[in-house]
Image (tube, coloured by chain):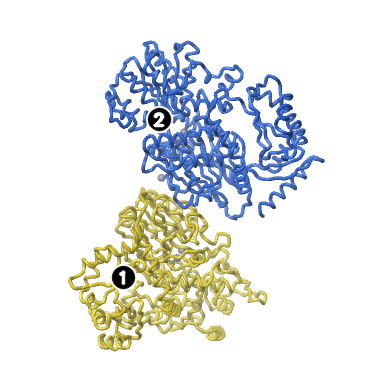
Chain colours: A blue, B yellow
């Protein structure tokens, strides 16, 4: 059956399911959803159940759009909307998108614009024809988010074509009589870096993650040249678990080499991913290296990205449904659940996850409607990989900061932009608010402020406690006055030249470059100051050398030869802030998983950690387990 | 480096290695070997060591050819050759092939034409310029062999081009910096039928076997549509272990769908393969079914086949060397050894093999220069799959025949054309020669006679005892006067209408059609006659039903409805003639393998047999084992 016939069939089915007197003008696929065009958006708005019932009957995601000819002029619409929403909703912007018939209303209190059960929204539709979408006015402006929104708007016509093509591909008919499911590991097995899997059936090919191993020149990229993934344009979808370079660093490369399909990820992952990729290109250029793609490829990838919410079941291929669940690792990180065929098989790929307490996120989800196979990360999978409790880590950090401040010193914390920086920020903010530490400035340098702004843009991805604090108590820790973004060279110079008690959080996290180096040079010689490591320092990095106790630190200073820094400052290591589950949490995750899987494969850890975890789960649960190897293909069904 | 430069380099190297005064005019690849053209073939003939030394220094197979302009006219050459070879060599034919500068001398006593250490051959070269090749005048003429030889001669120009293309591909430069070896199972795992593997490295792809599951409509073909083997023209070589449909039945299909490379197999495998494939098409047509390829594809495959001898190390890809070893299963069957990279890895794929005594073949080879991974057949891999000793089976068969003949009955033996038929023939011939059985005619119907002729064409593939019997004692059992090929419908009619004490061996082996059915209809009602099963009867076949004791046998008779045969004849089952190793022999094969492999994978058996054998080998030898699954890819390195 050709796609036109499928659409015609769907249109007839919808018409049969509509209340008498309601008509539709057209139907079309747009990415994973079916768009229903109507000249009577008001009638649909009147009956909030129509769409829900349709979606249930057709077993697909449905969106109703006004036919362009029934849309009121924007100026007129704004006036009518202003009359409809409560005075104190704090609307800060209107944004009309004629291609999708949507008006995006940015408001400080989005709940008031939505109304009880969406009443106010339906009211607006009835008055203006446009479909209103509400977004929260972000408390901190993110340059990245702003640029992305503008880019998407500028390219809406391209994007419409792209989504139509993708939609028609997803909803094509299944043709094979064979039934099988295979998983091919392209990278990230018995190693960390270049995570990449291919899930395939006779109908479809799904790539999960496409990371880069920044620490290695030889084994930097996944095995993208093997026949299973070639040609790249035969891949149906790329699914990204979260925005860390070892999981998404090479996505733009896929487009450079011919992939032309969708990227599925959460909203924060999409934005953070763009930020990281552009920075990756930047940092490499400064080191005289080259990333194997250009910023044009990053933009092309962005144009093809489709964002999904947690718990939203989505068709991504004729025989595969994807559902993201919270992974608790970084903002927008997702445990990815694949439902294959009509109940044939269920695969969960955890990506990186934290099954434990955190200031920012809820623990990773481990309850699924069904699951037979799990692929799990194993960063701390070795039997001795226990981490201190978060509570102890926090107390430890607060004590170190207090002591340094008390002796008029500077606390320097190298940190990754995304993830633990924000966790540490919250701990420090609380300590200051509660008076445990004096009110000193907390400087944020590198990408940390920008990443924090993205966190502030998507508060619905934060955990229950933090959301309650922000929305109900009106107390957003990220907005605390103690935080000072270092947004100019002058400010940085000033901090360095006029040392005063303060905390500095700066990238890079392993001291392999970035603004942290300038601070380090300035503050290392003074024994009043403290360098605090809150993250893992890999072998061969400057951070690791300092941890080992080097006293003379050679630093290259631009093209002007090298200088030596005399290391007198205090060095402290605070474990326990990891975004990964430690060994105990990994075992707990499987112990409490519901339902119990039939087999577990381990990856994303050094060889010993992967084998250790696989063998422990096998012993504990008496199910099939294996530490995967790169380049192998496992038959799941 | 382009291939022209590689050839130029080789030419220079050869010139350096030649004795002073010897010159060559050109070098070119032809399949796996390097052809050296010279205007002075006599000088090369003078010094038998030149070629051997060259081959050793260049680590490749070398053949020296006279430049066409130095060849004497055929008539003149025949006269000179006749003067050179001893009178009693019994030359029966000369065949000049100008494209390769060869004259094929067919003689009854090839040893006399060759002379001591090849002296006479060198003499011939010096006189006529042509390179003489000697073949034995086959004692029984095979139609298949004759047709194949004529076909190859008629297509010599095509073939020259094909071999040149293949040769240049094999000797291309390696380009990848990665090192890995993968094995993908495309069929024949946890099942018998459609055997097919793919061995791949960053440089090359080798397919091993490409069988058809004749017993199944749904799972008839290997998974040839998966990306690892697509497009087919990117496969470097197809290696065929032996001529049974479950190992080679779909080779012509590969050519139909775009494969254009070589098939490596032994000489008898090549000929028997053509016979089986054409018969496969024939039989299907008679059953109103269709084979998914045509006889033109069979011929195209033949044109691309390259025959190798046992123990001959051959480059089949830039980084892979293949060596065939005797497998003892059927004529020309080969245990295939793959040496990958420069000592990187060694894989042995056993194919079907017999590690035990047989009238026809030596036991399978299990000593290799090196071996890390073995893929083994498991037909009788289950722990209870013991077969009676061959000696007992033979005695049993002789006794049954004797008793039947003594009571003036007919012995009817359904048998497969290739393999056990010839074994049974030898046992019967011996019994008659030794007077254990009276001198009765032994009729051979179906393809059995043709298959026997192929055995007679390649006596060097038979075991030591049989070869000694044939060559030293001049006593070829296949030539015994007791054997009567049924080469006309009249003869068959005659045997049926004038019953007399005799033995009839006929296809098909499981009584699912073929001439056996006519004999059965005629002889079943008489209790003097005996039906003897010497091979396995699969579920659902007529043979199995008779074994179960059915007394009324319904038979379709062409389009004219069905008739019922009254079953009064004696039914006997004689186990022990299998061409497969039984459980004990499989375990012995690994116990005595040298060197000991690091891991063994099982296939070619029902699920239980494969799992049983894998687990027993693991327990006995403490090495990694696994029963493979179709569609999985194992990483070997
Ligand atoms: Zn991560
Ligand atoms: Zn990771
Ligand atoms: Zn066989
Ligand atoms: Zn077989
Ligand atoms: Zn074991």
Q: Residues within 10 Å of mark 1 (few under 14, many from 20)?
A: some
- Marks 1 and 2 sit apart, C-alpha to C-alpha, by 62 Å
For ligand 3, tell me if the residue under mark 1 lies within 8 Å. no
Helix, strand or loop status at disc 2: loop
Residue A2, x across and y down, in percent: 66, 54
Helix, strand or loop status at disc 1: strand
B180 or B500, nearer to the observer: B180
Badge 2 sits on which subunit? Answer: A
Residue B129, x across and y down, in percent: 27, 80
When the figure is inspected, residue A512 is found, relative to residue A63, above or below; the finding is above
When the figure is inspected, residue A243 is found, relative to residue B231, above or below; the finding is above
Please name which of the two marks, 1 or 2, marks the residue nearer to the observer.
1
Residue extending furthest toward the right: A21
Residue at which label 1 appears: B35
B573 or A313, nearer to the observer: A313
Left or right, residue B192 beside residue A542: right
When the figure is inspected, residue B221 is found, relative to residue B72, above or below; the finding is above
Residue A270 quadrant = top right
Label number found at residue A385: 2
Residue A458, x across and y down, in percent: 57, 28
Left or right, residue B162 beside residue B18: right
């Amino acid at each position: 059956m050709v796609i036109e016939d499928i659409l015609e069939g769907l249109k007839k089915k919808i018409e049969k399911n509509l209340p008498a007197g309601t008509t539709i003008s057209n139907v079309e696929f747009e990415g994973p959803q079916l768009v229903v065009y109507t000249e009577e958006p008001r009638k649909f708005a009147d009956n909030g159940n129509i769409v829900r019932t349709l979606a249930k009957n057709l077993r697909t995601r449905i969106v109703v759009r006004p036919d362009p000819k029934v849309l009121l002029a924007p100026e007129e619409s704004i006036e009518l909307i202003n009359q409809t929403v409560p005075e104190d909703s704090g609307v800060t912007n209107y944004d009309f998108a004629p291609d999708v018939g949507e008006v995006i209303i940015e408001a400080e209190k989005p709940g008031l614009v939505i109304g009880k059960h969406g009443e106010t929204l339906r009211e607006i539709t009835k008055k203006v024809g446009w479909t209103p979408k509400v977004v929260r006015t972000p408390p901190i402006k993110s340059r990245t988010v702003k640029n992305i929104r503008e880019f998407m708007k500028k390219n809406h016509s391209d994007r419409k074509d792209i989504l139509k093509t993708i939609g028609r591909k997803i909803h094509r008919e299944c043709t094979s009589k064979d039934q099988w499911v295979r998983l091919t590991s392209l990278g990230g097995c018995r190693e960390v870096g270049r995570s990449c899997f291919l899930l395939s059936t006779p109908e479809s090919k799904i790539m999960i993650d496409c990371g880069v191993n920044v620490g290695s020149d030889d084994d930097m990229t996944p095995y993208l040249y093997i026949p299973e993934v070639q040609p790249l344009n035969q891949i149906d979808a790329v699914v990204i678990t979260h925005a860390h370079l070892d999981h998404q660093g090479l996505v733009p490369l896929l487009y450079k080499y011919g992939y032309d399909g969708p990227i599925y990820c959460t909203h924060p992952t999409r934005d953070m991913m763009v930020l990281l990729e552009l920075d990756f290109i930047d940092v490499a250029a400064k080191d005289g290296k080259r990333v194997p793609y250009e910023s044009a490829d990053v933009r092309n990838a962005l144009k093809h990205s489709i964002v999904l919410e947690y718990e939203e079941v989505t068709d991504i291929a004729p025989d595969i449904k994807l559902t993201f669940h919270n992974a608790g690792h970084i903002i927008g990180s997702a445990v990815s659940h694949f439902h294959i065929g009509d109940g044939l098989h269920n695969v969960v790929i955890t990506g990186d996850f934290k099954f434990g307490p955190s200031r920012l996120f809820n623990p990773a989800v481990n309850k699924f409607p069904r699951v037979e196979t799990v692929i799990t990360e194993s960063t701390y999978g070795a039997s001795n990989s226990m981490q201190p409790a978060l509570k102890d880590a926090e107390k430890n950090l607060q004590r170190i900061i207090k002591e340094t401040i008390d002796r008029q010193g500077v606390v320097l914390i190298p940190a990754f932009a995304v993830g633990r920086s924000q966790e540490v920020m919250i701990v420090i903010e609380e300590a200051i608010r509660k008076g445990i530490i004096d009110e000193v400035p907390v400087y944020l340098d590198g990408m940390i402020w920008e990443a924090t702004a993205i966190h502030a843009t998507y508060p619905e991805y934060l955990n229950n406690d933090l959301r309650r604090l922000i929305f109900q108590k009106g107390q957003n820790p990220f907005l605390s006055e103690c935080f000072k973004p270092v947004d100019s060279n002058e400010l940085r110079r000033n901090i360095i030249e006029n040392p005063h008690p303060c905390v500095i959080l700066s990238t890079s996290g392993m001291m392999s470059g970035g603004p942290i180096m300038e601070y380090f040079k300035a503050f290392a010689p003074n024994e009043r100051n403290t360098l605090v490591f809150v993250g893992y320092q890999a072998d061969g990095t400057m951070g690791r050398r300092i941890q080992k106790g080097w006293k003379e630190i050679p630093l290259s200073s631009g093209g002007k030869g090298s200088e030596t820094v005399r290391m007198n400052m205090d060095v402290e290591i605070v474990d326990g802030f990891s975004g990964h589950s430690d060994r105990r949490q990994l075992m707990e995750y499987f112990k409490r998983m519901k339902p119990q899987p039939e087999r577990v494969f381990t990856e994303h850890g050094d060889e010993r950690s992967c084998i250790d975890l696989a063998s422990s789960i096998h012993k504990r649960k008496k199910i099939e387990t294996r530490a995967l190897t790169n380049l192998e293909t496992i038959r799941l069904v």
